[in-house]
Each structure stands twice: as C-alpha cells, then as structure tokens.
Image (tube, rainbow, N blue to C red):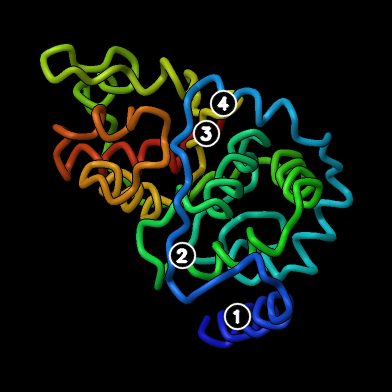
Amino acid sequence: MLKQTLLVTALIGTTLASSAAFSGHGEKPHATPWSNFALENKIKAMPKGDALKGQKVHEQMMCNACHGEKGESPSRNYASLNGQTAEYTTKMMLDYRDGRRWEDYKQANIMVKLAKAMDDQQIADVAAFYASNPSTVWDIETQPVTAKIDRLVRKGDVSRMIVPCASCHGAHGEGKGITPAIAGQVPEYFVRTMKAYQTKHRKNDVAEGMAQFTHDLTSDEIQALADYYATLNK
C-alpha cells in the first residue's frame, strides 16, 4: 500500500510541477459553498462523460492504485467508486479541486492534487466510467437487521429529526443524481464519512444536511448502517 501511495504521489508531483493551479502545501482555497441552484447548474454545464475514455483517465492518473481496477476498493482504506452516480463523483472531484472537501489535508492531499490536475472533461469521463461498473456486495459477517435499523432506513426517527436514509439514497441505496449511491460502500469508509459529517469535519454537502441527520446517531447505529449497506445489492 505504501508503494502504491508513493507511486501515485510521484505521478501527481510530476503532473503538477509546472502548474500554477496548485499553490502552497496544505493551503485551503476559499471556495463558495454550494447552493442547490449553483450545484445543479454546474453539473448541467459539465461535458458529457465517456466511460471508455474515463477508464483511460482512471489508469493514467493511477486511480486504480487506491480504488481498484474498476473502482472497487481493494482494501478497507479507500472508498469504492464502482456503481457510484456520475453526478456525485463529479461533485466530489469539483469539491476536492475547489477546496470544499478538505477534512484533513494530510489524508486528502492526493485527491486534492489529482482533482487539480484534471479538467472538466476528464472528471466527466472518469465519473462515467465508475457509473458504468456494478457496485460491490461485501461478504462480511453482520448481525441480523434489527427493527431499529430497518426503521432508520425506511422511516427515519422523527424524535431525533432524522429523515429515512431511503428518502434520499433510494430504497436499495442506489442513489440518484448528486445523492450518492451507498449500497456496496466500504463499511469502514462509510463509518468514517458519517463520523466526519457528525463532527462537522466534513461539510461539503449542500446546507450541511448530513451533519444534521447524523448528529444524534449512535456509534452502534452508524456501524449497523454501514454493514447493512455494504451487503446490500442495489
């Protein structure tokens, strides 16, 4: 894994050596938070993605070193991207590029640099590539889905102002548009993401909606949801 990271870092360093787009080490750009209107217009203005060209971008930029041959994470350290909606992947790359997603520079610097090295067409292409591949179904040992978790997924919890997961992410975790697919996601990544929203270390979602919905979830509930979606076939 260290060898892969060093290779990716070396490639990105070469790509950006003569680029003025990236200034300073760990210097966070001042990006305007998304509004629903601004995000919708930006996604509509993006070029049409080509999955075959996106596969080449995936390979040339060495995305496969961390995210696998087709976006399926080969380890529990990185997100799976296969089966993800093209719009959501596009949003994530734009957020990395512009500085909206910047939870921890030491962890995210590779993604920040990759995003800055890619133009809109490359982002659209690689997003189309991931969307063209089926999601992963993780073979992990899980506890039976409890009535409480089933309720959180399908009905939410009005007493804690938690909307049902399915209302945004779909009945099968398939996602739609800029709302991400979460079926087949790496459970460890799912947990880290929920914790980042909960503590407001990650706040690139529109109006910080996820921070509100995750605020009162317990660690056990987050883990149970992670296991539920990891084994869900959308």
- The residue shown at (76%, 41%) is 128
Q: Say whether disc 4 or disc 3 marks the residue closer to the N-terminus.
A: 4
Q: CA distance from mark 4 to mark 3?
A: 18 Å
Tell me which residue sits at (49%, 28%) in the image: 173
Residue at 61%, 61% in the rendered image: 67
Disc 1 to disc 2, C-alpha distance? 12 Å
Amino acid at dot 2: Ala
- Which element is circle 2 on? helix
Which residue is under mark 1?
9
Which residue is label 3 attached to?
A: 180
Which of the two residues, 1 or 197, is positioned nearer the viewer here? 197
Residue that numbered label 4 is attached to = 38
Secondary structure of the residue carrying tag 1 is: helix
List x then y, in percent, for residue 18: 73, 79
Tell me how far mark 2 sits from mark 4, CA to CA: 24 Å
Marks 4 and 1, how far apart at CA: 32 Å
In the displayed structure, 30 sits above or below 149; it is below
Name the kind of residue labelled 4 in the image. Ala
**Marks 4,3: beta carbons within 8 A:** no
Amino acid type, mark 1: Thr
Q: Earlier in the sequence, mark 3 or mark 1?
A: 1
